[in-house]
Amino acid sequence: MKRILLLVLLGLAAASFFAGVVSAGSVNAPEEEIIIKGEKKSARFSHPVHLKLGVECGQCHHDSGHQPLTDSSIAAMENSESLRCATCHNENFSNAGLQSIKDAFHQRCKECHKEGVNGIKGPTKCKDCHVK
């Protein structure tokens, strides 16, 4: 159970960073655990864990107006590059507190993990998501 909660936090972070693969009008999220390289420690994320909990794509993936993207809008994209956080969250982003991927992930993931999804809250301690 603790591992699942750990993966929930990482899942939201990675979901913002990595896009699902678009194929034949449907979204196919990566099945394998994703390792997100960090400044000090990497974090891990699992799309399947988050999807099983009921996390929808739009809870992590949003457009430039911060409106949630739907499965169908993601599937209609020609490629997944625009789903990566760094597309917008970089040195040119208007909010200085969200210019780094780390800051964007931490805000999005921690907020969701504290609130929970379908009554299940995720881990919020550093070592729960970050690996040695």
Image: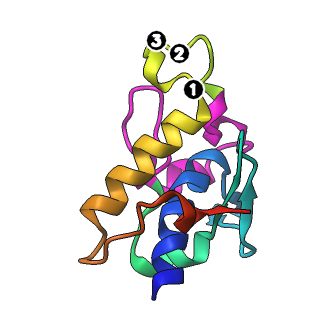
The local crowd at label 1, few if under 14, some if 14 to 19, many if 20 or more residues have their Cα within 10 Å, is many
**Magenta stretch, residue numbers:** 58-86
Residue on which disc 2 sits: 93
Residue on which disc 1 sits: 89
Is 68 on the left or on the right of 9, as rendered?
left
Whole-number angstrom distance, CA of label 3 to CA of label 1: 9 Å
The amino acid type found where label 1 is placed reads: His
Please say if the residues under marks 3 and 2 sit with CB atoms less than 8 Å apart: yes
Q: Which residue sits at x=58%, y=24%?
A: 88
Asked whether 78 or 109 is in front, the reply is 109
Residue on which disc 3 sits: 94
Please say if the residues under marks 2 and 1 sit with CB atoms less than 8 Å apart: yes
The amino acid type found where label 3 is placed reads: Ser
Whole-number angstrom distance, CA of label 3 to CA of label 2: 4 Å
Q: Is residue 125 visible?
A: yes
Q: Is residue 63 magenta?
A: yes
Q: Is residue 119 magenta?
A: no
Asked whether 128 or 109 is in front, the reply is 128
The local crowd at label 2, few if under 14, some if 14 to 19, many if 20 or more residues have their Cα within 10 Å, is some
Query: Residue 30 at x, y = what percent?
Result: 72, 68
Q: Which residue sits at x=73%, y=42%?
A: 78
